[in-house]
Image (cartoon, rainbow, N blue to C red):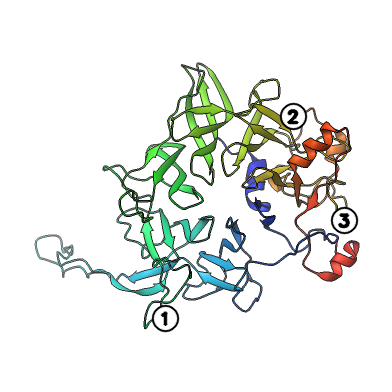
Amino acid sequence: MPVSPARQAGAVALAAVLIVGGYSVFFSQANDAAAAVAPGSTARASVTDAGLESPNGGRDQQISGDGRSVVFSSRAELAQPVEDEARNIFVRDLVRGRTVLISRGQFTIPDPPTSSPPVPGLRSRPLLSFAAQPVPVPGETAADDDSFEPTISADGRYVAFASEASNIVPVGTEPLTLIGVDRDPDGDGDFDELKAASTAMDHRFFAISIPLQGAPSVVPSAIRLSGDGGRAVWQERVSPTDYRDRTKTAVLRSPVTGQVGTPVTAAFLPTGLDGSSTASAQRQEEPAISADGRFVVTCSEYLDGESLFSTIVRHEFATGANKRVDLEPNGTPIGSGNVEVFLPTISGDGSAVAFVAQDDEEYQPNIYLVRPDVPASELVSLDTAGQPINATMPALSADGRYLAFATDALGVHDGIDGPIRDENTDNCVVPQSDLTLVNRVMTLPPIEDRRQVRTACQVVARDLVADRERAAAGLPRLPAALASVSADEACADDGVACA
């Protein structure tokens, strides 16, 4: 599925993850608008052990289900050993106030043998040496290339990420590998211990996207773990010559030993669609797995005859069913025509799915919440008057009650709004690359002038249960809770001064 400029902007500008218990993690820019006091506290995660700010920031962030650990990637030297300018994976333990390097090299590969001297009669070309290839030397060292796109289990014990490094796990000829890490190999509940009589970290590393049954793993990415770390989902190309991405899954927990490690097998999700004998998935991207490991949702592109459409599909592992869930309250498909649906998120038990719907040439995105088993569907990105607002990058809490998302709308949350931005300023909704587009087609709902009045993006959270209860009782909607609250106490007292 071609990635629209709006989706590209959303991927790099701001992200929010909300988990049960009220924790959120997001990427922020220093000059974004500050906010008034809100419940809870704000802590910077991309820091050193001493709490010093990362000079290069952090990205690809995700928070554990217990709210204790934040995993992210950064090019900063927040912990050792790292190579200069390499992107690495770190975990910030918010309870211990500790930042741990996860992407650690586990061996050093000596230089290969030199070639043989020229041999007469062969146009003086040197012959390659037939000496034995160098044997890796065990020992902790810096990873020799970039690692990125981390994910973390509910309790923070397991981390997985994509890596171009060749010295974390044996990768053969694979240029990109998905790697898993157990931060507590002895299972005593104490993560990130040192090995006995050593300064090396006691982590256990294992490959996830290894070639299986002779088939290569082609550009795997976007890995996600179930809550217990026992199942993984990710997307990768269908083949070396087919650039379409589809979602793959593997069981990481051994049914014999119970240990999480390299899978025995991995498989692409089925391509069918419930209720249709002719529709077939051409792409399955942006996988999100339920914490219980029973469901995965994907942003998919289906072909049915000559009709190509965007859709959100929930796959159930036990039954193999692929259920379309991007539906209006009356059952009409949302992903149709120019309307794209993307960035799905799923509750811990798979009973609720949220996603973005937006015209592929317009920047007034909406967030829908669907409960496929009820069934029920509702537009949830609304202001206090019940009017749609621009919203993107949704994240559901494990119990499906709370929804966090990014918005550039005014008057949405209980904090202080920043200044209105002019039409030539990009943010999490409007990408810099598309500020000059003209003659944009209509979005769904139709384009509204009031939604073109934008401010700096903020992360907000809504209590969906309270919203439904108040609507049923005929009471007005409450403002969303501002999640991207400034950590600066002066900003909390005088948000305008910090805007």
Q: Nearer the viewer, residue 148 or 384?
A: 384
Which residue, as the protein is rendered here, is positioned at the far left? 121
Left or right for 109, reference 12: left
Q: CA distance from mark 3 to mark 1?
A: 47 Å
Which image quarter: residue 213?
Answer: top left
Q: Nearer the viewer, residue 298 or 196?
A: 196
In the rendered image, which quarter contains the N terminus?
Answer: top right
Question: Upstream in the sequence, badge 2 or badge 1?
Answer: 1
> Which numbered circle lies on residue 199?
1
Residue in the image at 85% along x and 35% along y:
386
Q: Secondary structure at mark 2?
A: loop
**Vertical comparison of 265 with 181: above or below:** above
Residue type at tag 2: Thr
Q: Which residue is mark 2?
A: 443
Mark 1, residues whose alpha carbon is within 10 Å: few (<14), some, or many (≥20)?
few
Give yes or no for contact between labels 3 and 2 (Cβ–Cβ under 8 Å): no
Q: Secondary structure at mark 1?
A: loop
Which image quarter: residue 497?
Answer: bottom right
Instruction: Kindly report which numbered mark, 3 or 2, lies closer to the viewer in this rendering.
Output: 3
**Vertical comparison of 76 with 481: above or below:** below
Residue in the image at 30% along x and 51% along y:
256
Q: Which residue is mark 3?
A: 416
Q: CA distance from mark 3 to mark 2?
A: 29 Å
Left or right for 443, reference 128: right
Residue type at tag 1: Thr
Q: Residue 239: in sight, yes or no?
A: no
Residue type at tag 3: Ile
Residue in the image at 62% along x and 48% along y:
11
